[in-house]
Each structure stands twice: as structure tokens, then as C-alpha cells.
Amino acid sequence: MLNRRSVKERNGVQEASQAFIHLDRLTRNLRLLQDLAGPRPLWPCVKANAYGHGLEIIVRHLESLGIDTVCVAHVSEAVSLREAGAEAAIVVLSAPPPEACGAIVEHRLEPVVGSREVLEALSRARVDGSSPVSVHLKVDTGMGRIGVSPEQMPELVARATALEGIRVRGLMSHFSLADEPESTFSQTQIEAFERACAETAAAAIPFRHMANSAAIFDWPESRFDAVRPGIAMYGLRPSIGVAHPRAAELEPVLDWVTRLTFLKEVPAGVGLSYGHTFRTERPSLIGTFPVGYGDGLPRSLSNQMQVLVGGQRCPQVGTITMDQTLVDVTALRGRVEVGDPVVLIGQQGAERAHVDEWAETLATINYEIVTGISARVPRVLG
């Protein structure tokens, strides 16, 4: 279990903004994913600061729910978890450099491996008498990143099982088009992975795992022995293309909230913020809130987004700057004051500001938005 002291304490100074993390929603999302996965264990992905939600907060809660394996991208993420007291098995999804093998052995990490060279480096790094290093061998079925082809996997498995101090805990692959259920390529990938599994069955590898969030919903034949939920665990759809009706039950775990720090009446015809990209068309009440692109609010959303103030949608105006942003609250004149909450992402009254709106406006994905919320924004329990 993670040490409770690893959660940063606030010093009483009011933060410019906060990302509220709702663990009750996270729990319900996990139950939904477990319903779909059946008896197979969930191995949640907590890479990139738990998709922007706060690595230590999320992993502490996962361990309290009995989750025994989590996945990160880099050795450095895994080491930070171990130093904070995490006890779960930690799968490192990116190909580790040989010089990281010592840290992998020391911190009992489980690297994803796709080459003989890394297997041999891990075997050399292991201290005599210590526990074997658990590895997950990667089959590249069409993603094109790390891993070997299905035809090369028997040779890699044979080398792994022959090396002293190496234990193959998993055989894995990763989808490239799982969030496009109309595509036939995902089925091609599943069949390629099944072929690799069949050709290495004699090795009795405990876990075969392939399914990400989208595949948990739409590709049940890919669930195998364990599943690796990522974005869906945090209450966000992998894409609008996910067809399973239960995806609508996901609850966003993160709310991003700030407050108004200034209000001013502005005449018609006045340019606002850098470049005067917005000019008032009528006498306007303009508010300022202390969040900008330095916090992860994309500058490219300037004049294209809305925030929630007083339970209403209000247009953001002018260029988003590094630390402060403007909002037109003219519609709330007489009912708004400095200190009122401003919801960037989340619910206020009957209205919801959803991260998917930002992603659609910017022609990107919700993953990029939430992972882009900077460390300047404290993650606190909601």
C-alpha cells in the first residue's frame, strides 16, 4: 500500500485551480470494466501521471480495491511508485534501455521485452540468489512499435526460458485500431496473437493480455487472461467510435475548477488579451480566472471554448495566456462576483463541460487533454 504521507499536503494558500479526483466514480468505472472482463483481472494503466489524474492518488486507491498489477510507460514512473510504497506488480510497457536493467531488478519491475539483448541484460543484472525477473514478451501484431513478429516469438520465448533468472509472466500485444469497431484489422491482430500463443503454448506462460479500453468494450475475443484498461477507467470514452452501449455509463473522474479573480466592465469595441483576437461587440462584463496554457489549458482553444459560471455556459474570450484567461460573464451581470467558481471540466448545476468538447474542437483525443494538465494544478480528492 502506498504511504499516505506521499500525498502532498497543501499549505493553506488558495490554489489558482484544482483538479478534483472522484474515487467513487473511479470505483464504479472499474466495476463496469470488471463486469465486461468477467473473471479476468484488470491491470490498469497508470502511465503519464495516471492519464493526468495523479499517479499516487490513483494507485493507492487501486491497491485498496485489491488490484495486484498496474502498468506504466517508463521505468522512472515505476521507480517513483516503489519509492512511494506501492506493492503491486508494475508492468513497464515501453522498451527498457539496457542501462535500466539494474533498476528493474532492484525495484522488482516487470518489463515488456521484445529482444534477446534486453533479456540477456536483465539476466546479467540479476543478483545471485534473488527472485527471478518477471517479463512480458511483446508480439507486434500490427502496431509497429516494439515487439517481434508472431513467427519470431517461439525463438524469443525459448531464449527467455533458457536464461537464468528470467521468468516469463506474460505474452502480450497491442491494438492499433481497437476504437474503430468497423475495421477488420483488429480481428487480424487477434488472430496473429492467437497464432503466437498457440506456437508457444508449451512454455505455459501464465498470462496472455491484449485488450485495451476500446477492446474491453468491443472485442470480447481479445480479453484472454487479463485486460489493460486505460482511458475508460478514468471515465472517458476511448473514442466516439466505441459501439458498446455500456460505454455511456462511464463517469469522468476528474473535475477541473478555478475561480474568478477579477471582474471589469468593458465598453463596446475594445480588444482583449494578446493580439486583440477578440473585440467586444457590446458593453460587456469580463471576468478573469487564473488558469492558462502553463496549467495545460490549450492556447489553441482561444475564443473557441466555454466554461461554467453560475451554472451557465459562458464563452471564453481573447487569447488564452500562460497564467490567466478571460471569460464573458455579461449574461450574469448582477449575479456574479469575484471568488465565484469557474468549472473548466466538470458539472455545475445542470450543465457539464466535458473534455471531449475540447478534443473535438482541437481535432485531437481526450487523452491528450487530460495528460496535458500540468503539475502546477494540484490533484486533490473530490
Image (tube, rainbow, N blue to C red):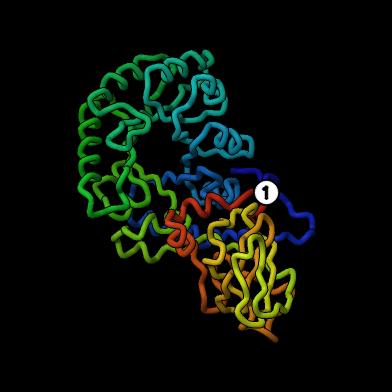
Q: Quadrant of the N terminus?
A: top right
- State the SS at label 1: loop
Q: Quadrant of the C terminus?
A: bottom right
Q: Is residue 92 left or right of residue 345?
A: left
Q: Is residue 301 left or right of residue 42?
A: right
Q: Position of residue 195 (x, y in %)?
A: 20, 32
Q: Position of residue 202 (x, y in %)?
A: 24, 24
Residue at image location 52% in from the left, 13% down from the top = 128
For mark 1, does the 10 Å Cα neighbourhood hold few (<14), some (14 to 19), or many (20 or more) residues?
A: some
Residue at image location 55% in from the left, 76% down from the top = 313
Residue at image location 66% in from the left, 82% down from the top = 283
**Which residue, given by chain and number where applicable, does mark 1 sit on?**
7
Q: Is residue 221 left or right of residue 9?
A: left
- Residue 325 or 99: which is nearer the viewer? 325
Q: Position of residue 159 (x, y in %)?
A: 33, 16
The answer to whether one can see residue 18 in this image is no
Q: Position of residue 341 (x, y in %)?
A: 66, 71
Look at label 1 and name its amino acid: Val
Residue at image location 68% in from the left, 44% down from the top = 6
- Residue 73 or 317: which is nearer the viewer? 317
Q: Is residue 188 left or right of residue 243?
A: left
